[in-house]
Image (cartoon, rainbow, N blue to C red):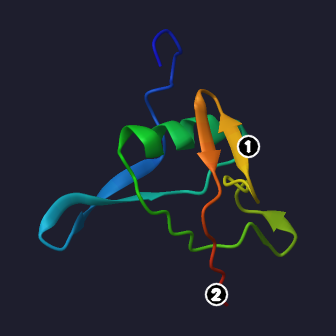
Amino acid sequence: MEGVEGSDYINANFVVGYKERKRWICAQGPLVATLEDFWRMIHEQGVELIIMLTNLEEYNRIKCAQYWPGAGTSTFGQLRVGFVQEHRYS
């Protein structure tokens, strides 16, 4: 973001996909302080699907913030995010 120091960095990397470079992005789950940065990355990179491979909490320790709205919409910075679908697997 223009004029905001450090806003051009998020702990994420592109991963080579089958027949395509930069097909996947791997990132740590965002914390409350980085939710806006996370959603800005999703928007800027045109991400269509997010797959989460961890629980929000493990052994009574918070692993990441719930970055999606439970229902309806939520606003993160200048981005409005709407709930579409969620599948949970054990």
Which x, y percent locates residue 66?
A: 73, 56
Outermost residue to the left: 19
Q: Secondary structure at mark 2?
A: loop
Q: Residues within 10 Å of mark 2 (few under 14, many from 20)?
A: few
Q: Give the number of the disc on residue 89.
A: 2
Of labels 1 and 2, earlier in sequence is: 1
Which x, y percent locates residue 14?
A: 31, 55
Q: Nearer the viewer, mark 1 or mark 2?
A: 2
Q: Nearest the camera: 29 or 86?
A: 86
The amino acid type of the residue labelled 2 equals: Tyr
Mark 1 → mark 2, Cα distance in angstroms: 24 Å
Quadrant position of residue 65: bottom right
Q: Secondary structure at mark 1?
A: helix
Q: Give the number of the disc on residue 70.
A: none
**In percent of the image, x 43 and y 28: which residue is there?**
8
Q: Nearest the camera: 7 or 70?
A: 70
Q: Give the number of the disc on residue 32.
A: 1
Whether residue 74 sits left or right of residue 24 in the image: it is right
The amino acid type of the residue labelled 1 equals: Val
Outermost residue to the right: 60
Where 7 falls versus 28 (above or below)?
above
Which x, y percent locates residue 56?
A: 74, 66
Q: Across the whole image, how many numbered discs are drawn on residues?
A: 2
Q: Quadrant of the C terminus?
A: bottom right
Which x, y percent locates residue 78?
A: 59, 27
Q: Residues within 10 Å of mark 1 (few under 14, many from 20)?
A: few
**In percent of the image, x 61 and y 45: which residue is there?**
81
